[in-house]
Image (cartoon, helix red, strand yellow):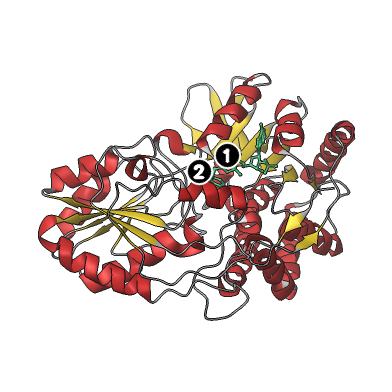
């Protein structure tokens, strides 16, 4: 049994079962049997089943949102939005089932074409920061493409995924097509990564664990989608709408208390606008409410755990020039108010490492080239924003930044319809959009001779 703690109250809220390691063999075998049934069903059945998952999620939206908030500490409004996105994701991939196909290829002597076939059994290893939402980005396209899915939620945050498993029992999926295993990543997660019956791992988490998964998966040549860490930048030019850029950049780093792989934990500001921007950013940060995530007006809940709070706090050392304009919440939860670090040395940890908490570094730059070089001076490449009214510059900088997604005059990173994933050590493969379907299928080429 694992004790699940509400990070806002420190109360134990559940003690879910842990999947014994000896059970993995039977779980994978069940998934393989279910997948063989699933892939043979008419595609209309698959479409209908995915739509019914969306309906089931919507009718349980409040329960799922309450669980997500109690388990992760995120504001209830955010949890509702995420659960709504889960339903929309299943609808999107229900619609994708009959719109995803191969190519015909001009060759001599016959007809050559490709078909896309499911991989088989997919293991989704999910993180704790967006437990159900990120899992759904992988579960929905995997099922749409004809695979079976086994999900391993993060040990600290399994509740919404376990509830999801329960509510979709009313959808008539083949027995074993969707299963959840719980327990430690280094035990059950590792067992799935090693198992020859699992064809693909979709992993979201740290770059370090992603590397371990990649090494282990190499033993059976598994397909991989890895969505890993980030050190994303908002790049703000002096001609931008500074008030809007400051307001949005605040949300882009302090949303989910900074526990977001897309968090723009570096804000790079053109030197001539630096002081004005810092004043606006600090004002916007001061309006954030750190407190009970069950309250509608809360902007930031606690961090997920005591260990994580300690890790994030370790970034703040006495050498830094720090502002902290929002009030912190009293104990007992794992609270941390937002912190703004002004013009730190470019080689400081706060500029170089993923923090995954409510700390932002605001650095000045002098030229467009300097801004691009600074934005790219990281091992990561997940997301980013550019703020300017100059369309040519927005495109030059967006193209120059080595990241999987960029928003111009916006702080959003994720849209269900668009591909999402990282350059460099932020990962490989793409989630969401039709691009995700490529990650859940193999390409088969068929040639039919016309010679006879
Ligand atoms: P991990 O990367 O260790 O965990 C992510 C998932 O992988 C969890 O489900 C975990 O299970 C599982 N896992 C752990 N070890 C293995 C393994 N050997 N084989 C297979 N699966 C495994 O993240 P942490 O929770 O330790 O967070 C550490 C840091 O990672 C954070 O501070 C943050 O910087 C980053 N992170 C990034 C995320 C992102 O969205 N890109 C999401 C989460 C974290 P279990 O929880 O049971 O250990």
Can residue 295 be spotted in the picture? yes
Q: Viewed as shown, does residue 23 lie left or right of 449?
A: right
Label 1 CB less than 8 angstroms from ligand 1:
no
For the C terminus, which image quadrant?
top right
Report how far apart the C-alphas of labels 2 and 1 lie in the structure.
7 Å
Q: In what element is the residue under mark 1?
A: helix
Residue that badge 1 annotates: 439
Q: Say above or below: 138 vs 269.
A: above
- Residue occupying image coordinates x 68% and y 67%: 9
Question: In the rendered view, does 234 fall on the left or right side of 149?
Answer: left
Residue located farthest toward the front when viewing the structure as drawn: 318
Which quadrant would residue 237 be assigned to in this image?
Answer: bottom left
Rendered location of residue 132, percent (x, y): 66, 57
> The residue tagged with tag 2: helix, strand or loop?
loop
Q: Kindly tell me whether mark 2's CB lies below 8 Å from ligand 1.
A: no
Q: Position of residue 355 (x, y in %)?
A: 44, 47
Name the residue nearer the viewer: 255 or 202. Answer: 255
Task: Verify CB contact (< 8 Å) between mark 2 and mark 1.
Answer: yes
Q: Which residue is mark 2?
A: 430
Q: Position of residue 21 (x, y in %)?
A: 85, 33
First in residue order: circle 2 vs circle 1: 2
Q: How many marks?
A: 2
Instruction: Characterize the local packing of mark 2: few (<14), some (14-19) or many (20 or more) Cα atoms within 10 angstroms.
Output: many
Mark number, residue 135: none
């Amino acid at each position: 049994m694992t004790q699940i703690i509400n990070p806002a109250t420190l109360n134990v809220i559940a003690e879910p079962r842990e999947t014994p390691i000896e059970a993995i063999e039977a779980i994978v075998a069940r998934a393989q049997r279910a997948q063989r049934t699933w892939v043979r069903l008419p595609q209309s059945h698959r479409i209908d089943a995915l739509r019914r998952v969306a309906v089931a999620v919507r009718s349980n939206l409040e329960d799922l949102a309450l669980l997500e908030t109690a388990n992760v500490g995120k504001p209830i409004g955010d949890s509702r939005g995420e659960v709504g996105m889960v339903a929309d994701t299943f609808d999107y991939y229900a619609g994708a089932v009959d719109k995803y196909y191969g190519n015909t290829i001009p060759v001599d002597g016959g007809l050559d074409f490709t078909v896309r076939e499911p991989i088989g059994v997919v293991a989704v290893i999910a993180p704790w920061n967006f437990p159900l939402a990120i899992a759904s980005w992988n579960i929905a396209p995997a099922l749409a493409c004809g695979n079976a899915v086994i999900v391993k939620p993060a040990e600290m945050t399994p509740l919404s995924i376990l509830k999801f498993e329960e509510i979709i029992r009313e959808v008539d999926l083949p027995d074993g097509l969707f299963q959840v295993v719980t327990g430690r990543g280094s035990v059950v997660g590792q067992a799935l990564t090693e198992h020859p019956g699992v064809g693909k791992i979709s992993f979201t988490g740290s770059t370090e664990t992603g590397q371990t998964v990649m090494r282990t998966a190499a033993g059976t040549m598994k397909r991989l989608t890895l969505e890993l860490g980030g050190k994303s930048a908002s790049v703000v030019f002096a001609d931008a709408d500074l008030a809007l850029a400051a307001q949005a950049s605040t949300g882009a780093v302090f949303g989910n208390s900074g526990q977001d792989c897309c968090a723009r934990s570096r804000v790079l500001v053109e030197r001539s606008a630096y002081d004005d921007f810092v004043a606006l950013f600090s004002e916007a940060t001061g309006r954030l409410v750190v407190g009970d995530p069950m309250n509608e007006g809360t902007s930031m809940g606690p961090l997920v755990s005591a260990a994580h709070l300690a890790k994030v706090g370790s970034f703040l050392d006495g050498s830094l020039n720090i502002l902290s304009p929002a009030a912190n919440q009293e104990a007992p939860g794992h609270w941390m108010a937002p912190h703004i670090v002004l013009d730190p040395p470019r080689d400081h940890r706060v500029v170089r490492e993923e923090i995954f908490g409510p700390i932002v570094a605001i650095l000045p730059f002098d030229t467009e080239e300097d801004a691009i070089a600074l934005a790219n001076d990281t091992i990561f490449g997940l997301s980013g924003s550019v703020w300017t009214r100059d369309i040519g510059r927005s495109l030059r900088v967006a193209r120059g930044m080595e990241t999987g997604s960029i928003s111009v005059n916006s702080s959003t990173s994720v849209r269900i319809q668009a591909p999402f994933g990282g350059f460099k050590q932020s990962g490989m493969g793409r989630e969401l959009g039709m691009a995700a379907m490529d990650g859940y299928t193999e390409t088969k080429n068929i040639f039919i001779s016309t010679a006879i």
